[in-house]
Image (tube, rainbow, N blue to C red):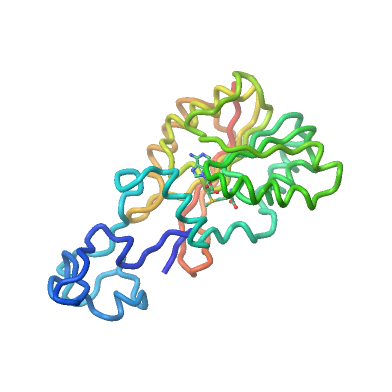
Amino acid sequence: MAVWGVDLSCIGCSHYKGLKKGLAVCDAYKDKIPYSILSGDWDHRKSFSGDHGIQFELIDSKSAFSEKDFWINVYRNNKAHWTKKEPSLLTKKAITKLGPFSDVLEIGSAAGIDTFELAKSSKKVTGIDIVPEAVKLAKKNLEKQSPAIKDKVTFEQGDVEKLRFKENTFDFVYSLSVLHSTNIKKSLSEVKRVLKSKGDAVIYVILKSGKEGIDEKLFVNTINDLFSVSNIEKSEVEDDGGDIHKISIAWLKNE
Ligand SMILES: C[S@@+](CC[C@H](N)C(=O)[O-])C[C@H]1O[C@@H](n2cnc3c(N)ncnc32)[C@H](O)[C@@H]1O
């Protein structure tokens, strides 16, 4: 089972212990993990008979390996399902409400699908992604765009926590489903630093439920510390695997 490309099978669980006498074991099932959990048929974030309250806990991507390695792995294992999507409705809404733009930064641009949409209403758009393979894919997709879009869009590898851009560079910063897996204080401080005065940012994050997502209080406190908050939307969305996530969309201004 995968949620947003993250493996939720035993192999991605911090309680998994490997094989004992040829059988897969874990902290909950010390002799044999039941087949329905091991096969992924049962989502073991929910309790299962005999687990004594020990359920799936995602290996902490930052302690087990770096965030960058984590995302590289997602792309290598063909779990980056968002590389084949349509432009997001949020992207279109942001353009309608806030556009047209001069200089835009998209963080976590992946295959560039939303970047191309932003470029239709911008003079210049830069898409950054932490994974080199994502940047390569976005550049390949850029080749298929019209000359007008090709002239406006650039993709490069970059980490939102350490942006290479100068202060006051962009009039719009956009990030869809990325910052909840980063250090939010570092990331949003960088967003603020590169945003022009009176510039806008739209930030979509997944809120914490279980081990995933960002703590809502931390997110809300951080945006309030750094920005003037025009609006915070909160809703539930269903991902490709049919799981429901709580999400938040922050509409921010750099006052
Ligand atoms: C869940 S995907 C979302 C992709 C795209 N924004 C969308 O919504 O379709 C998260 C993307 O953010 C990138 N990413 C993760 N951490 C990042 C970071 N610290 N800096 C820049 N990009 C990052 C990942 O490589 C991945 O392409």
Residue positioned most to the right: 147
Please state which of residues 242 and 106 is positioned toward the viewer in this rendering: 106
Q: Which residue is outermost to the bottom?
A: 35
- Does residue 68 sit above or below 200 in this rendering? below
Where does residue 77 sit, x and y in percent of width and height?
48, 61
**Residue 217 placement (x, y as % from top left):** 38, 39
Quarter where residue 95 is shown: top right
How many numbered marks have been drawn onto this rendered protein structure?
0
Quadrant of image for the N terminus: bottom left
Question: Residue at 69% of width from left, 33% of height from top?
Answer: 104
> Which residue is more in the foreground, 219 or 165?
165
30 left or right of 192 in image: left
**Where does the C terminus fall, quadrant-wise?**
top right
- Which residue occupies the foreground of this view, 215 or 173? 173
Q: Judge whether 135 appears above or below 38 on screen.
A: above
- Residue 176 as seen in the image, left or right of residue 211: right
Using residue 206 as the reference point, say whether residue 215 is left or right of it. Answer: left
Left or right, 54 with reference to 200: left
Name the spot of residue 161 as percent of width and height, x first. 47, 32
- The residue located at (44%, 29%) in the rendering is 186
Against 223, residue 129 (above or below) is below
Q: Residue 26: x percent and y percent?
A: 19, 67
Q: Residue at x 28, y 58 (%)?
A: 57
- Residue 164 location, quadrant: top right
Q: Name the residue at 52% across, 41% down.
A: 130
